[in-house]
Amino acid sequence: MSTVPSRARRVSPARAVDEFVLATALLFLAVTAVRWLRDPGSVLCVADLDVAITVIGAFSGIVLTVLILTPPGRRSGGHMNPAVTVSLWLMGAFPGRGVLPYVLAQLAGSAAGTGLARLVWGRPVALPSVDYAAIGPAPAWQPSAVFLAEAGGMAAIVLVVGFLMAHTRFSHLLPYAIGLSVALVITLLGTRSGGSVNPARQLGPAVLAGRTEDLWIYLVAPVLGAALGAWLDRLLGRLRRRLPAGATRVAASADPSGEGGVPAFAVNGYAALRAPGRATAPTPPISVQDRHSSDRKG
């Protein structure tokens, strides 16, 4: 039985629209970055793949942080990733009734953003060196290794953000922490497994590029990794219960109904709530202790 206020657990359809807009922007910018950095005819082309991936990773991290802090990101929580939405639901920080609308909006935004990039930049997006920014593993990597890497990368992100969310004094760092985490995953795994860790990042590019042979891995592995991360976070939460009061989890809902709290910080699906007009640290509607006590009751 959750202790999150009922009004904070309603998800307005408008928040799913925000997720669609955010996912569209994310994919458009992702394809744009690859178009300019990997097209041999581009003045910004980076021939060295490792260097290009590092630049793309840094750019992606910055884009995520900025999108999270935009008005749509603050309103919806700025998930932009079905795996994030699922992890928040499993951690009791996002209402189950909002999962499907968010996921559908994110996947639709993936297709829309990729298509928009093709429309804006034209034929270079379809070049083999760009290929709609579709992600693929290194030739030497077996599907099982790719699956484990993508799942592990997502689990690590969930654990990092979960730890920071459990300590409200760090909440102001969350947008930057998630951007840095994603940038590191892309940099470390980009030339290996692909470094997607986001089904919405791969769906649109893979479908439009016709590269669907490994698509199931990039759709399933991040979600399972998110579930693993949520489970480990719950396990760590049992240890947090023994800590002094003050280590609390901030709810991920930005009160989508427009009532009560407003989002102070949103981190790829996480939002700290504060009462309107207050300049103090966010007050969480659910604590680690409360959440795990709820789990035991039902």
Image (spheres, grey):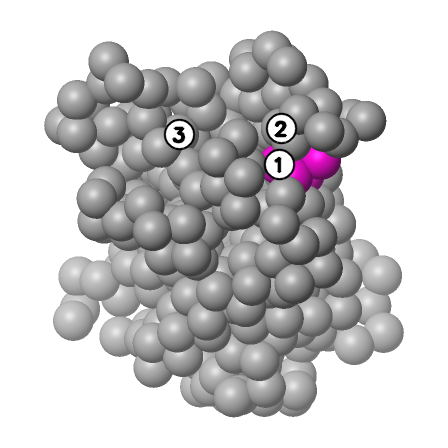
Residue 229 visible in image: no
The residue singled out by tag 1 in the image is: 34
x%, y% of residue 21? 63, 71
**Secondary element at tag 3:** loop
Q: N-terminal of the two: label 2 or label 3?
A: 2
Badge count: 3
Viewer-side residue, 62 vs 171: 62
Would you name the residue on which mark 2 appears? 38
Residue 84 against residue 37 in the figure, above or below = below
Q: Earlier in the sequence, mark 1 or mark 3?
A: 1
**Dots 2, 1 in contact, CB < 8 A:** yes
Inter-mark Cα distance, 2 to 3: 15 Å
Q: Dot 1: what SS?
A: helix
Residues rendered magenta in the picture = 33-37
Residue corresponding to mark 3: 194
The picture places residue 92, in percent across and down from the top left corner, at 35, 63
